Image (cartoon, helix red, strand yellow):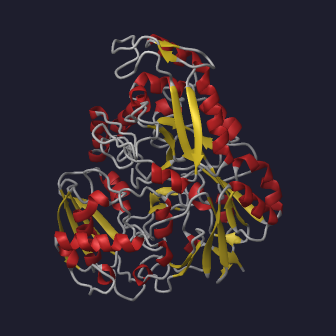
Amino acid sequence: MGRILRAATAATAIALVAAGCSGSGGGSGTIGNGESAAASKKPVKPGGTVTIAQVGATPDFVFPFAPATNQNGWNVNLTQPLWPFLVYSGDGADSVVNKSKSLFSNLVYSNGDKTVTITLKSWNWSDGSPVTSRDFTFVYNLLKANYANWNAHLVGLFPEDVASVSTPDAHTVVLNLTQAYNPDFYTDDVLSTIPLLPQHAWDKTSATGAVGDDDTTTAGAKAVYSYLQQEGAKTTEFATNPLWQVVDGPWKLSDFQASGAYGYVPNTAYSGAKPTLDKVAFAPFTTDTPEINALRAGSSLDVASLPLNDIKQAQALESSGYSIASVPIPGVAEMIPNLYNAQVGPLLRQLYIRQAMEYLIDRNQIVDKVYNGYADPGNGPVPVKAEGAWASPLEKSGGPYPYDPAKATALLQAHGWKVVPNGTTTCASPGTGANQCGDGITAGQALTLSLVYSSGRSTTDVQNAAIKSSEAQAGITVNLKSEPFNTLISEIGTCTASSHPASGCGWQLAEFGYEPYSLYPNGTGYFDTGGNGNSGGYSDPTMDQLIKATEYGSSAATFTQYEDYAAKQLPWLWLPLREGILVYRTKLQGVVPLNPFSEGQDFEDWGYTA
């Protein structure tokens, strides 16, 4: 699954569209995926600034290993251009490992896939020091002592699954794992979450302390990690703290404003293909309305997302010097049920209630009417457009719960509910029998729920209003509340059977926008017990077993078994996931085809035509 971080739908122009394997958008019209533009690429001239719109969300942490409580996925957008991952996912529009941008030159599995030998490229840090295997062991030591406080940690995986690490030379790392893994899974979803960090500059416990080998002891590693996390939260020092100026990526952070605006300048010492542009700047917008107004004005923005409710603006924008591309997103849009909310947890723990709610979501209508055809239908845990190679026949045929209000009503009635269409459905037969409401549900209890979701996009408002209306057909009341993305993620705690404090578990249903996938789209971290993206506390031994089977083996049948089980069990309610519609200046080359997995942040490939 890879990074387990929340992503607001269309929080930035780039992050919204950083997805998709191939093919054009699903809607009508002339929007494509930009491949023809790439094919006609013209020579570029050095220099220039690109200004990118960012809607509704901002980064708030710069140290690449954010605390477990920080689920802001846009921090990855901020840090990836500075400290890229060991395995860099996505190459153009292809869902493959990008070998030219990865930090390794060779990666070999041996010993029955229990040993991984990584050969690092002979690259340098921005201060001229070489990138070495010591930088990897620095990362390993920090995470070994602190993985419980790392927001991208996948339960039972790196570094827990490493029996030992050796470094035969300055550019070789040997991982001896505790068991054999599917190499595709381990490369695509585990090693793709690991950046290298500059041990020679960061291995210290205070601003005035000397750099040493503190990370080599557990106590020292904890102290270093604590210091770096403290510094990483100081937004006013993101661009000035000397720590964050030592990078191995193509960019350095030049400024970061309280408003959420920030910018990059080239890392002139970058060992890969160096950027052509002089600067990349992000301009924040609270909603999509001022963003589209800025696009119409035509002067301030070079790259932005086009709201799907403004799709008719495409032709006018193209005549004003912009090009437009549509790309599916590799991720899953969701409504997460809090199975341990004090008021409605007993309702949401009943599979038949989740099934009834899914039957009442008219996903095809939402795709057609809200997103003008530019969306994945959301038939289950794997997107059929962006990850079609992994999608099962069940998902491709519409999923296990196509829109069917009659089935939803029948399910509720069969379990002891008095269904009042467009009214209030209540439990008429409490108890745990097969034809009763279920454990913890009281007589007369109403099927009334609250959904909190990320604000900023009018299409999301329209979608959720449609869901509220369709759920009412079976007397299910869904009260809606939208909040800014950064506010939303600060309020949503992880709730489980053993821990569901009122302070973080007052939410009932939550919708962040979407959850991003890595190259291998299994349920690790989202649907497994204790997964750090499993906010609602879903736990099922069969699901855990099936997810582990996809990690250890490479059988397509095993993956399909997991996928169909997850689709049917509804750990989340499945929703359509809009495609990204990117608007960019036609004279800006290299933007498309977009990298499916780098959040589209391959700015070093961009340049203005001569």
Res. 293 visible in picture: yes
Total count of labels: 0
Which quadrant of the figure has residue 294?
bottom right
Q: Position of residue 383 (x, y in %)?
A: 51, 42
Question: Is 176 situated above or below 369?
Answer: below
351 or 208: nearer the viewer: 208
Residue lying at 42% horizontally and 26% vertically, measured from the top left: 347
Question: Is 185 situated above or below 527?
Answer: below
Question: Is 419 situated above or below 232?
Answer: above
Which quadrant of the figure has residue 434?
top left
51 or 291: nearer the viewer: 291
Which quadrant of the figure has residue 211?
bottom left
Residue lying at 43% horizontally and 13% vertically, measured from the top left: 415
Relative to 51, is 502 on the left or the right?
left
* Image quarter (top left, top right, bottom left or bottom right) of the C terminus: bottom right
Q: Position of residue 102 (x, y in %)?
A: 41, 69
